[in-house]
Image: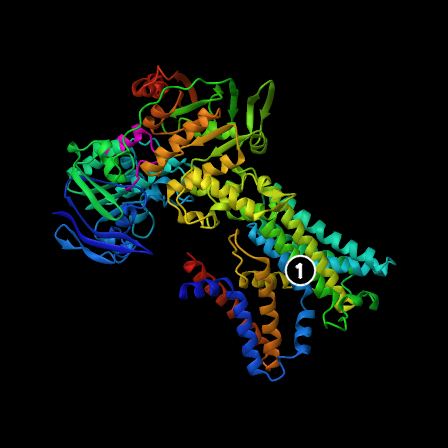
Amino acid sequence: MSSMLLRWLNQYLVLISLLLILATFALAAENFLSFATFSAILNQLPALTLVTVGMTFVLICGGIDLSVGSVLALSSAVIGISVAAGFSIPVAALAGVTAGGLAGLVNGLLGSYLRLPVFIVTLGMLEAARGAAYLITDSQTVYIGSAIQGLVQPMSWLGLTPAFISALVIVVVAHFVLTSTVFGRHVIAVGTNPEAARISGIDPKRTLLVVLCLSGVLAGLAGLMNAAYLGSTDPNAGSGLELAAIAAAVIGGTSLMGGRGSIFSAFIGVLIIAVLQNGLAQIGVSEPFKRVVTGVVIVLAVVLDRWRADRSF
Amino acid sequence: MGLQISNLCKDYATPVLRNLDLQVTAGEIHGVVGENGAGKSTLLKILSGLTLPGAGTVVLDGEPLLTKNPQAAHRAGISLCSQELSLIDNLNVAENIGLRALPGRLGLDKALLATRCRSLLSELQLDLLPGTMVGSLNLAERQMVELAKTLNVQARLLLLDEPTSALNDQQAQALHRVLRERAKSGASVLYVSHRLNDVLNLCDYVWVLRDGEVVHHAPSGQLTTAELIRHMSGADALTQRRKDESGRPGPIHLSVRNLLTEKMQQPVSLDCHRGEIFGLAGLMGAGRTELLDAIYGLVPHSSGSVVLCRGEERIALSSVNAAIRSGVGMVPENRASHGIFAGLAVAFNTTIAELGRIATRHLLKPRREKAAVEKLIQRLNIKSEGVDQPIEALSGGNQQKVILARWLHRECSLLLLDEPTRGVDVAAKLAIHDLLRELRDQGLCVVIASSELQELLTLCDRIAVMSSGQLVRTFDRDEFNQDTILAAAFSTHNSAQVA
């Protein structure tokens, strides 16, 4: 009986942690448990959620993508100048997402076919894409206007924005792709043991390439979400986002060594980070202290995960 | 004097050692045999401080031995060569061998290190330069370096866990000579191995373990391999398999012509038939693995061709994907690093090479997968708690069966196997042999490389012998025996010495 309980605890450890954090804030802050708080938290999330989905795929495949924050900025910069040049919002959005995908493609080609370490390649892209974002916007904020903000207007009956709902749909689809498709199996196999994958007929290079492209496209989409949220494009947008995404993935139990992770759990990791940020702000914790707490939570998550891995036999 | 173990117990989830009693007289070599899971490795782990016993006492040379950790065991004069190699790729041979006691006060005394290393290497008849990086060595050479590392310290108790699993007969004999010398100078030696002939030839005394207990022990002179197998398995029915008669081979299926890769020294040509088990024999470094890798397309061909014949159709293979698409399967030499997907379920490991059969338009069908895998588990008699059990929880033999199941799931017509029974217990080994015969009888073409000559002699219809990267001769069943094959394996070495 107790082993059943333990197994259940193991499986839902991340979710239980989220609920515990929520409960703590509900007790500590009077107005925390309110519709307004939740819709505020959730509606901030689309960009981080999308980037985390891409990051989780890359991490499970045994790579890492440090460029996502800069690619987000590049994508939103492309959207900004496209709108400024007179293109319609959908065309501009497509251009932004394409820019993200191309950045991912470059990462993938260099990382898999030239066999350069993905860490270094995406570190280079982190600088290059950020630089490109500054260049094409002349380091200025580009105003887009209210047309794009429809994405982030809460729909009256739910309090949720179209941006958040589409991010949620992408989470569900990505989870399904990872757990229930041939491609998902290939990603896990390559991340677990690339040599055994090759001997089993899976092309590790191509798999990594696809996954890095996917991460680029999702960072591009995140750029669109970010532009909609701000109503303008800021070349500084998304700086440090790659670390938040890695943190969310890791809190969700993704292994940095590849092979292990879950999109749903990574999404709960996103929620944990967001709830912490908002909850701590509500109880009046200072910004520096918030960062200390977030750091502790990340490490704690890995400790818990290690503990879980050791007992899951 | 020597080693006395009494009432040693150890539990993990289930008892692994139950009141184990075992004595080794100083100056003697004692063999420990048993199927996987009998408790051999746990015994060595306790003695070398890698894990703590649940109960029981260990006395070494009259003093009670408490090995809390590997450092304590090392100070007590215990040296272990474990089954999993522990070499550091980025250090050279000499540095790896000397790692436990690097000479020199402030700086590293490289000259002294190299001298010591050379004498050890020559003792073991290992033809390696001390300055070679370990990362560039093949598995057999690594195992020899690991052994040299174990023998480098002045040990009162030497523990060896499957020390010859990657070695050929010649190499194993060099090791045995060194072990006998160490025993003569007063060390106690505990030798764990699945190679029963080696155990009987080398050891003074043999202990048979089953389910964590000693079920039989006797001087090796009073034992035969058949008896050992009977005690290990606990079943009387399991006796040495007869050499079965050669099947009637079908048409040529694999045709290799003048194949050359960067790693191979000489172009190789050979033909293998359907309905045939084709063996690759040779000494360490003879190029068996390199040849199999080249056939499978793991390394690009610099010249020559690998052709698969299907009726009138001729399919040239040049890459792994081309090979797999055409019905070739591979069981790699190194199960842990190239074979299994650790941490993932038995089902994942079984179906990964052919997901199309359990998917509809890229969508996996879990029920179909479960049914397919359960069928294979039953067919190969894989001992697991179910399709969802992580593969690393299985014994070595069962892991290997899963990798074979992977290719049965895929349904291949040519199966390449590199050391398929290394580190596998006797029962699983016989089961794997039976399976290969069954596949042969179904018309598959099976190519198997092994450093264990006995295995090839009992299993193969034809045996090709490689020596120094060349294929020297191919023997039919009525031509091969231990002597003819060994002579061929050494043929290029002798001429090299003359030149």
Tag count: 1
Residue at image location 65% in from the left, 59% down from the top: A171
The furthest residue to the bottom: A30
Residue A188 image point, x, y percent: 55, 49
Examine the rendered structure and indicate whether residue B93 appears above or below residue A61.
above
The kind of residue on which mark 1 rests is Leu
For label 1, the residue is A50
Q: Nearer the viewer, residue B278 or B201?
A: B278
Residue B298 appears left or right of A242: left
- Report if residue B84 is visible in the image: yes
- Would residue A193 be visible to someone looking at this image? no
Residue B167 among those drawn in magenta: yes
Q: How is the image coloured?
A: rainbow
- Tell me which segment is drawn in magenta: B161-177
Q: Is residue A304 above or below residue A203?
A: below
- Residue situated in front as seen by the camera: A163 or A195: A163
Which quadrant of the structure image shows residue A56?
bottom right
Q: Is residue B183 left or right of residue B300?
A: left
Q: Foreground: A13 or B259?
A: A13
Magenta stretch: includes residue B428: no
Secondary element at tag 1: helix
Determine crowd level at label 1: few under 14, some 14-19, many 20+ residues with C-alpha closer than 10 A: many
